[in-house]
Amino acid sequence: MKYFKLLYDYENDNDAICCISNELNGIDQYVVEKGIFIKNWNMGIILFYNPKEGTRKTDFLGNDLGWLIVSAKLKNILEENFITGIQYLPIKIINALTNENLENYFVANIYNLVDAIDLANSKYDIFVVGDNEKIITIEKYALKKEKIIDVDIFKLKDDTIPKFISEKVVNLIQENNLTGCSFLEVKVT
């Protein structure tokens, strides 16, 4: 099976809604990137969008937090097809000019963490910080096949920002004409 890095579709977002964070009400914006199940989600988180910059609703909404914000349609399709390891957290998205609530969107918190990075077959750079700390930045990912069998959506154990999906999920997105998503195939070894 093929695997892909899930990306926001910047090539087709000219008139799409893009959300800006304003009121996180005490939530650390990076908690969603950690790959953990969130027990205490603040229902008062509000994102805003300016309709002068875009009004087209996509199934993956662009935002300044890097969060995977999905429509109820995308959420329901994933749930109906037993795509697990995702927690759907409610969020308020408000039109900055009219104060109207854009309903039926969720933060998709992916908590499937998989130790699947294959550094030997990935393209990466190592930066030395200070005396002993090294930071690895990966340009092209390679994943270990045996670690991702039967896993349809996940993050990497030591690199929790990128989101990865199986060919099954890509097909569901494409067959249902879901918008806002782009895919970059990754090597599987």
Image (cartoon, rainbow, N blue to C red):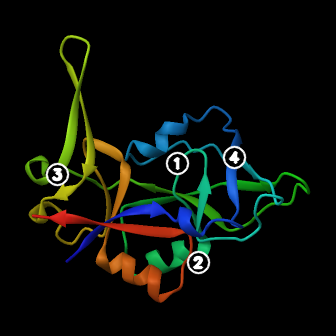
User: Whole-Å distance between the Cαs marked 4 and 3?
Assistant: 33 Å
Marked residue nearer the N-terminal end (1 or 4):
4
Query: Which dot, 2 or 3, sits closer to the camera?
Result: 3
Query: Where does residue 64 sit, x and y in percent of width and height?
Result: 61, 46
User: What secondary structure is marked by label 1?
Assistant: loop
Circles 2, 3 touching at the beta carbon (< 8 Å): no
User: What secondary structure is marked by label 3?
Assistant: loop
Amino acid under disc 2:
Lys
Marked residue nearer the N-terminal end (2 or 1):
1
Quadrant housing residue 132: top left
Q: Which residue is mark 4?
A: 20
Q: Using the image, tell me which numbered label, if any, was put on residue 162.
A: none
Q: Dot 2: few (<14), some (14–19), or many (≥20) neighbours within 10 Å?
A: some
Q: Dot 3: few (<14), some (14–19), or many (≥20) neighbours within 10 Å?
A: some
Marked residue nearer the N-terminal end (2 or 4):
4
Query: Residue 149 or 120: which is nearer the viewer?
Result: 120
Quarter occupied by the C terminus:
bottom left
Circles 2, 1 touching at the beta carbon (< 8 Å): no
Q: Which residue is mark 3?
A: 122
Marked residue nearer the N-terminal end (1 or 3):
1
The answer to whether 95 appears left or right of 83 in the picture is right
Amino acid under disc 3:
Ser
Circles 2, 4 touching at the beta carbon (< 8 Å): no
User: Whole-Å distance between the Cαs marked 1 and 4?
Assistant: 10 Å
The answer to whether 98 appears left or right of 170 in the picture is right
Q: Which residue is mark 2?
A: 73
